[in-house]
Image (spheres, rainbow, N blue to C red):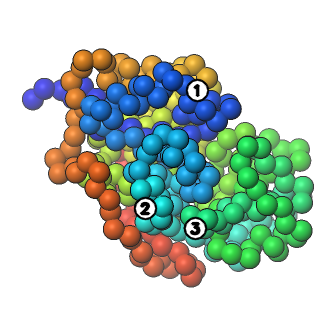
Amino acid sequence: MNPRTAYALIATDLDGTLLRGDDTLSDRLRAALARAVAAGARHLVVTGRPAPRVRPLLEDLGSEGLAVCGQGAQLYDAGTDRLLWSVTLDRELAATALGKIEAEVGQVYAAVDQDGVDGLTLIEPGYLMPHPTLPAVRVQRRDDLWCEPISKVLLRHSSLSDDELAAVARGAVGSLATVTMSGPGTVELQPCGITKATGLALAARHLGLGPADTIAFGDMPNDIPMFDWAAHGVAMANAHPELKAVADEVTLSNEEDGIAVVLERLFPRGGAAAYRAPGAVPGAVPATVSVPVAGGPGRRSSSPARPGR
């Protein structure tokens, strides 16, 4: 059997990975992605951003396929502009988790991403958006954050580093939620057990693909589950040390077209087409999945991700 020349599924984080600091993609990276797709590969965005904050980027890329959003809590279909699958964070549990964290470190400042394709990002007084280009609505009181179902909570502290805040939050929250660190100034609480790997596994299964078919790119600790699931994990040069420690490869930074460097190697001009798993159907759109899960109203889930290595 001839060895594969590439991967059938290219999973990329957004901030600090696919996107440059100004939220743009270089012409070189666009060309590398286009060549991979032309060779038969599928490009899948796997991001902490909620679906409404991803939609404009997918439109810019001309993508009408799937995207994993909200740290794996949402599977979004760009072609139909709908969520095929979503898991909400119980709002009472979220409020309890915040109280436990504040009992350890004093006041934190919180924001939430609402569920749904038109969900808003709400921020309480004192919270500063880590990505000023992303729209947000400021509310008057913390209680106003819980007015609609949410997919996650974002946290900031006035003096603790992201690493310090994440470590304290994990100890304080326990099984109430999953704690992730997804970027500078971005510590998050999401539904317990939900990670980028669970969303990636669900999307891959809909595409007829699996861990062995997947190469993943990322830059922060929230990408570790995705790297554990995929056959090959590539960290950016600007990645957090925790992610570099588990990566199979380190490429150049997001500002230096690190993803393009790897894709140009895997999908050379005039090279062989990408490997496609048996049964994969290009362009197939999955049906809506809605499976109740114990732990609160409105929660939906699927089977957990399989370990990739």
In the rendered image, residue 185, in percent from the top left (x then y), is placed at 76, 43
Residue closest to the eye, 7 or 65: 65
Cα–Cα gap, marks 2 and 1: 30 Å
Answer with the quarter of the image where residue 2 lies: top left
Label drawn at residue 254: 1
Which residue corresponds to mark 3?
Answer: 116
Cα–Cα gap, marks 1 and 3: 29 Å
Q: Is residue 14 above or below residue 261?
A: below
Label drawn at residue 80: 2
Residue closest to the eye, 132 or 265: 132
In the rendered image, residue 88, in percent from the top left (x then y), is placed at 58, 70
**Residue visible at 70% across and 69% down?**
94
Residue closest to the eye, 187 or 51: 51
Q: Is residue 133 above or below residue 99?
A: above
Q: Please state which of the two labelled residues, at mark 3 or mark 2, is closer to the viewer.
A: 2
Q: Secondary structure at mark 1?
A: helix
The residue type indicated by label 2 comes to: Thr
**Residue visible at 79% across and 61% down?**
137
The residue type indicated by label 1 comes to: Asn
Q: Secondary structure at mark 2?
A: loop
In the rendered image, residue 199, in percent from the top left (x then y), is placed at 45, 56
Residue closest to the eye, 118 or 108: 118
